[in-house]
Image (spheres, rainbow, N blue to C red):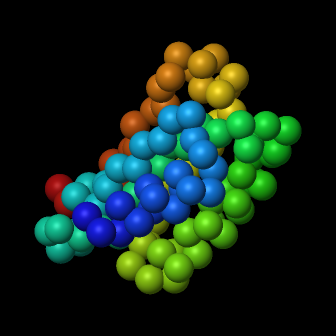
Amino acid sequence: MQIQQNIRQKLEQTFTPLHIEVENESHMHNVPEGSESHFRVLLVSTQFEGKPLVQRHRAVNSTLSEELKGQVHALALHTMTPEEWFAKGGSVPESPPCLGGGKS
């Protein structure tokens, strides 16, 4: 749970989010039990206003560069402004099942 906590802490410090979710989805993949390698992040921040999706993702990837160099294999990002978040009713789709060697 250390990597998940580090991701959350760094994103909170950098983006001062209105809403944040950091979910470890490693259990959905063919990795050892207890792994922290696949994450889904939902991040709602005013800092994303006026920025295209690619700039938002680059900002998050830059913030988490150390984690991405290490154990984190996959990072699903949902980055939104508060206006976008409220327009979606405060929800995002669930991650699809792993198709690349996932557990059956």
Q: Residue at x 48, y 75 (%)?
A: 67
Q: Quadrant of the C terminus?
A: bottom left
91 sits left or right of 38 in the view: right
24 sits left or right of 27 in the view: right
Looking at this rendering, what residue extends furthest in the bottom direction?
A: 70
Q: Does 66 sit above or below residue 39?
A: below
Q: Does 88 sit above or below residue 94?
A: above
Given residues 94 and 104, the one toward you in this image is 94
77 sits left or right of 83 in the view: left
Write down the quadrant of residue 62 in the picture: bottom right
Given residues 68 and 97, the one toward you in this image is 68
Q: Does 52 sit above or below residue 85?
A: below
Given residues 38 and 59, the one toward you in this image is 59
What x and y, as percent, mark residue 91? 47, 26
Write down the quadrant of residue 81 in the picture: top right
Task: Tell me, yes or no, if residue 66 can be seen here.
Answer: yes
Given residues 52 and 93, the one toward you in this image is 52
What x and y, as percent, mark residue 95? 40, 44
Q: Residue at x 70, y 60 (%)?
A: 59
What x and y, as percent, mark residue 16? 60, 45
Task: Tell me, yes or no, if residue 99 can be seen here.
Answer: no
What x and y, as percent, mark residue 23? 35, 50
47 sits left or right of 14 in the view: right
Number of on-image labels:
0
Q: Residue at x 17, y 68 (%)?
A: 34
Looking at this rendering, what residue extends furthest in the left direction?
A: 33
Q: Quadrant of the N terminus?
A: bottom left
Q: Residue at x 61, y 67 (%)?
A: 63
